[in-house]
Amino acid sequence: MPNVLSSISSSQNPKARYALAKASNRIFARILDAAIVLILSFGVAIIIVVTDKAGIKAALNLQQTWRYLLMSLISTIIFVFYFLLLPYLTKGKTIAFFMFKLRIYNLIPTKNFFINLVKREFFLWIVVVFANLVLGITLCTMSSNDAADFLKRLMQSDDNAKTSQASVVIFQVLYAIGAILLLFVVIHMCINNKRRCFIDHISDTVVIKLVDISSNESNSSSNTKIGGRRRNYGLPGEIIGSAESEIDSL
C-alpha cells in the first residue's frame, strides 16, 4: 500500500495544505503514542499476572513462568501493530498523529512504505521490543524462583540475587542502547526542529502537519514562487509558503 496522495488543489480539498511538523508536535505525539501502548501492555500484563496462582501481590514470583513469555509476546504484538501496521494501514497516522494532524509521508513512492516504517521505528522501539521478547523467552526457561531472582537483579532491587551477573548485564545494555538511541533522536529532532532528523533520512520519509486553508496561522500563504509559478515537491497537496525553503533542503 503506497503512501501516496494525488495532487489536490485548494479549491478541491480545503485540507490539502501542509507544513513540515515541528519538533514539539512530533515529540508530544510520540509521548502520547507511547503512553497509549504502555497502558495497553500494562493492562494485558495485569490480566495475565492476576490469573496466576501467585497473584498480583507476588508479580515477580509467577508460578507459571510461561506467563512471562506470554506478556512479552502480547506486548510485542501491540507495539508492532501500533507503530508499524497502524500507520501503514492509515497511510502514516497513529492515534496521536491523528490528534496532532500529523502524518508520516513516504518521499519515494516506489519504495515499500512498510519497510520504511521499520527503518524509522528500529531506533525508537524495535531494539527495546526485541530485548523484551528475548527476556520473555529467557524467563520462560527458568524455574519460578530463578525467574524472579533474574528480574530482581535486572531491576537492581536485590543485591543478594544469585543470577549470573553477565546475563543480566546483557539485557541492561540492550535497554540502555534503546534509551540512548531514543534520547539521540529527540535531541537531533529538536536541533533540526522543522527539518528532517536522521530517522527521516534513513527511512526516506518526512513528517508533515496538515493545515486547513482557512487557518489563521501566519504561515498559511499560498504555494507559489515569485512570478506565480507553482512548486511541485511530489508531496500531497500544497505546501504553505514559509516551509518552502525547508522542503527545498530535503
Image (cartoon, grey):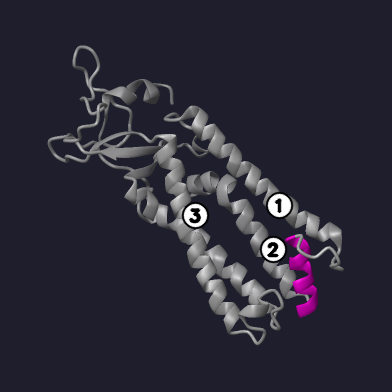
Q: CA distance from mark 3 to mark 1?
A: 19 Å
Pointer 1 residue: 174
Q: Residue at x 25, y 40 (%)?
A: 6
Cβ atoms under marks 3 and 2 closer than 8 Å: no
Outermost residue on the top side: it is: 227
Viewer-proximal residue, 103 or 160?
160
Task: Please provide percent x and percent y for residue 50.
Answer: 58, 82
- Picture coordinates of residue 186 (x, y %)? 54, 38
Residues at marks 2 and 1, CA–CA distance in whole angstroms: 11 Å
Three-letter code for the amino acid on which mark 2 is drawn: Val
Q: Label 1 is placed on what type of residue?
A: Leu
Instruction: Name the amino acid, label 3.
Output: Ala
Q: Quadrant of the C terminus?
A: top left
Left-right relation of 190 to 16: right
Q: Residue at x 42, y 30 (%)?
A: 194
Left-right relation of 248 to 18: right
Q: Is residue 197 visible?
A: no
Label 2 close to label 1 by CB (< 8 Å): yes
Sooner in the amino-acid sequence: mark 3 or mark 2: 3
Numbered mark located on residue 34 in the image: 3
Q: Which residues are magenta?
A: 144-155
Residue that mark 2 sits on:
134
- Mark 1 Cα within 10 Å, few/some/many (few <14, many 20+)? some
